[in-house]
Amino acid sequence: MIQYDKDGVTVYYTDASGNRVSATPFDGAKYSGMLAIMDEQISAASANAQAVANYNTALKNAQTSVDAGRSADAPPKPLQTVVSDTGVTSYVPFNPPLADLVPLDVTAPSTGTIAVPTVDTQAIMYAMLTAIYRKMFPTT
């Protein structure tokens, strides 16, 4: 990442070989080019922070729906914008990786039945009414 030196004017970065590449205001185009790349790196960092915040908000909303038992799709994961010290822009997955949507854990009954057996209240009521009718109107 391009940054200012201790003097507050010189900008520099360290290349892949470990060499320090710097420019002062007297270097003209090289200095202004490095400043432009540094501005791109700073704006990429803020755009990445905003993308993560938006993704986390969308993920929380989807997770709330899933936790409530409704189906929801996970939001698409954004890519991180990386601007190299030479000015090349690339898009890579975030490191560390962004969180995923946690599916609802549905547990089936352990008895192996689909429906829980319940008391047939209609049959009980019919039997009671039949008994009352037979008591009130005997057949003999």
Image (spheres, helix red, strand yellow):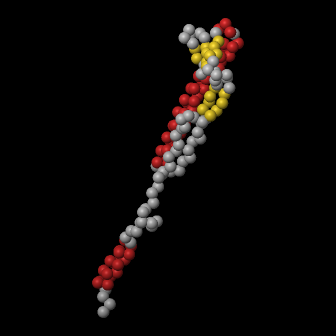
Residue lying at 58% horizontally and 17% vertically, measured from the top left: 3
Seen at 45% across and 57% down, the residue is 107
**Location of residue 89 in the rendering, given as x and y in whole percent from the top left corner:** 66, 27
**Which image quarter holds the N terminus?**
top right
In the image: residue 129, left or right of residue 113: left
Q: Is residue 40 visible?
A: no
Of residue 79 and residue 120, the one placed in the foreground of this image is 79
Q: How many marks?
A: 0
Displayed quadrant of residue 28? top right
- Residue 27 screen position, x and y as percent: 68, 9
Asked whether, in this view, residue 104 is left or right of residue 88, the answer is left
Vertical placement of residue 56 versus 108, above or below: above
| Residue 112 location, quadrant | bottom left
Q: Is residue 71 visible?
A: yes
Closest to the observer, 3 or 99? 3
Outermost top residue: 26
Q: Residue at x 56, y 46 (%)?
A: 73
Residue 105 lies, in percent from the top left, at 47, 52
From the viewer's perspective, is 130 left or right of 31? left
The outermost residue toward the left is 135
74, 89: nearer the viewer: 89
Give the quadrant of the C terminus.
bottom left
Residue, far right: 29
Question: Residue 97: image x %, image y %?
Answer: 55, 37
Placement of 7 over or under 1, stated as above or below: above
